[in-house]
Amino acid sequence: MLSIVPAFGRIGEENAFAVLARANQLASEGRDIINLGIGQPDMPTPGPIVEAGIKALRDGHHGYTPATGILPLREAVARDIHRRHGVEVSPDSVLIVPGGKVTMFMAILMFGEPGAEILYPDPGFPIYRSMIEFTGATPVPVPIREENGFAFSAADTLSLISDKTRLLIVNSPANPTGGVTPKHEIDALVAGLARYPDIAVLSDEIYGTMTYDGEAHHSLLTYPEIRDRLIYLDGASKTYAMTGWRLGWSVWPKPLYEAARKLAVNAHSCVNAATQWAGIAALDGSQDCVAEMVAEFDRRRALVVEGLNGLPNVSCITPKGAFYAFPNVVKTGWKAKKLTSALLEEAGVAVIGGPDFGVNGEGYLRLSYANSAENIARALERMRTFLAERLGG
């Protein structure tokens, strides 16, 4: 009998893909399924970006590239960071990767080992905890609370640091909650981290272009006092509707860059060439497509929040970023996972249970409003009918 190493028994997964698979199966059986589960823009990749990828193939960009990414794309990332955040970064600190998860994978591998502790947001992106447990490190959840607008608390975070802490993961704007952490909390966190100079920080800013109601995204790159231990995560998947292209990038402090490069060589060699040239078109081209997409998400956000607050015994604070709502369903009397299963199987609405994002996610659902306004309205009506009929079940 084959036996793999125990670490693989500790790997979790992202349940949004399992829900998507079940939703697709039901749809193949003739069911009308509305998917508000997957975190993927429903808009197509903008035309100029697609054309740049096609041109790259026609121009013969068919071979390997440097493991760190082609220099023109690393330069484009540096320009974009300066344009958005007013920060100078060297292209030599930029690493091009096949999606944001790769940066998480690398950072957690670098600092996770038995005896180490890694702090991560909870509820938060499930791959954080999965990879921490894979390395044998101890995952330490930082509670993300509704009463705090689903922003992280600097005080809560700093209180959980111990002499075993090796890495801190922060995420704003946040998945799954849509929370945006205000500058005063980030200021307090950075000030507190001065007492812990040996702790690395992974800042997941993949939703950094998606904020609403005048909220600003404050990148941790703008804090020079932690730049020598900050790993910045970003990419094209959400901002440019390029999930299937698999294009991400990261900025690494000098002491870690060579280790990250070697991991890239060992893991994936390089990102496919045509996608990298398309990435240049995305970053250097007009950003009107981004503004238009965010404006559309904003319109849908209003529809989702109003609709959720109109459901029996459901409440939902207004998310300030990303494209998720995280409604509170405690008063329905249902456990979150049981409710999501029933909504999919009986009402034809796919959403994700809060516990799939951590122990603090019980009592919540995640809805993605990266779907059409028409489908959102239909899904909310189905949820209303289901809850009215089954409340307390």
Image (tube, rainbow, N blue to C red):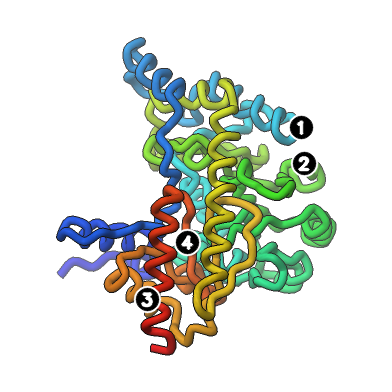
x%, y% of residue 189?
Answer: 78, 59
Neighbour tally class for label 2: few under 14, some 14-19, many 20 plus, Cα within 10 Å = few
Q: Which residue is mark 1?
A: 86
Residue type at mark 1? Gly
* Quadrant of the snapshot with the N terminus: bottom left
Q: Which residue is mark 2?
A: 222
Nearer the observer, 141 or 297: 297
Foreground: disc 2 or disc 3:
3
Residue 133 seen in the figure: yes
Give the residue at x 52% y 73%. 364
Residue type at mark 3? Phe
Neighbour tally class for label 4: few under 14, some 14-19, many 20 plus, Cα within 10 Å = many
Is there a contact, CB below 8 Å, between mark 4 and mark 1? no
Is there a contact, CB below 8 Å, between mark 2 and mark 1? yes
- Say what secondary structure mark 4 lies in: strand
Foreground: disc 4 or disc 3:
3
What's the CA distance linking mark 2 and mark 3? Answer: 47 Å
Q: Tell me: 202 left or right of 367.
A: right
Neighbour tally class for label 3: few under 14, some 14-19, many 20 plus, Cα within 10 Å = some
* Residue with the most extreme top position: 59
Q: Which residue is mark 4?
A: 367
* Quadrant of the snapshot with the C terminus: bottom left
Q: Which residue is mark 3?
A: 386
Tell me which label, 4 or 3, sits earlier in the chain: 4
Give the residue at x 49% y 22%. 70
x%, y% of residue 67?
Answer: 46, 30
What's the CA distance linking mark 3 and mark 1? Answer: 49 Å
Foreground: disc 2 or disc 4:
4
Foreground: disc 3 or disc 1:
3
Nearer the observer, 161 or 276: 276
- Say what secondary structure mark 2 lies in: helix
- Say what secondary structure mark 3 lies in: helix
